[in-house]
Amino acid sequence: MDFEQGSINISDDVLKEIAFRSFIEVLAPDEKDVKKLKKSIEIERTPDDNVIVYVRTVAPYGQSLVEFGKKIMKNISENIQRMTELQVSAVNVTITDVVEKIETTEEEE
């Protein structure tokens, strides 16, 4: 982003951290599982400097998988756009398993 006084560059690591914190707000995992979940998020930039976020997660059994995924998508998208003023093109959520209690799976480690 260019301004009269200079430019501001936001790294992919910062975007990943915002996405991660937004993700765990929805997921509410145990503290011991939090660090493992960061590996389940990937950031991609388009040529127009828009952001695409990829999230892999498990979902709680008995809950609407679509609604669960939409909550994650909305929270991540809104927070990145609000904090960085970058456009989020997509938040792609892949549900890898359905579990009784949300915990990280071996695949996400």
Image (cartoon, helix red, strand yellow):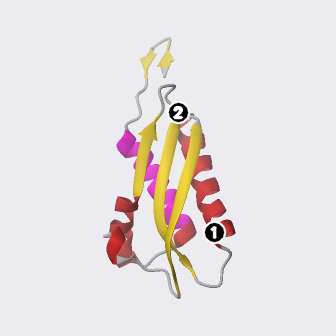
Residues rendered magenta in the picture? 12-25
What residue sits 57% from the left and 40% below the top? 88
Image coords of residue 105 (percent x, y): 38, 77
Toward the viewer: 105 or 13?
Answer: 105
Give the labeled residue for mark 1: 68
**Residue at disc 1, secondary structure:** helix
- Mark 1 residue crowding within 10 angstroms, few (<14) / some (14–19) / many (20+): some
Toward the viewer: 48 or 30?
Answer: 48
Image coords of residue 98 (percent x, y): 53, 80
Q: Is residue 53 above or below residue 100?
A: above
**Residue at disc 2, secondary structure:** loop
What residue sits 58% from the left and 35% below the top? 87
Among numbered discs 1 and 2, the one appearing first in the sequence: 2
Q: Quadrant of the C terminus?
A: bottom left
Q: Is residue 95 above or below residue 46?
A: below
The Cα atoms of the two marked residues, 1 and 2, are separated by 24 Å
Residue 43: quarter of image: top left
State the predominant SS element of the stretch in magenta.
helix
Amino acid carrying label 2: it is Asn
Q: Is residue 14 magenta?
A: yes
Image coords of residue 103 (percent x, y): 43, 80
Amino acid carrying label 1: it is Phe
Residue 61: quarter of image: bottom right
**Contact check, label 1 and label 2, Cβ < 8 Å:** no
Give the labeled residue for mark 2: 50
Res. 108 mark? none
Q: How many marks?
A: 2
Toward the viewer: 73 or 66?
Answer: 66
Left or right of 70 on screen, residue 52: left
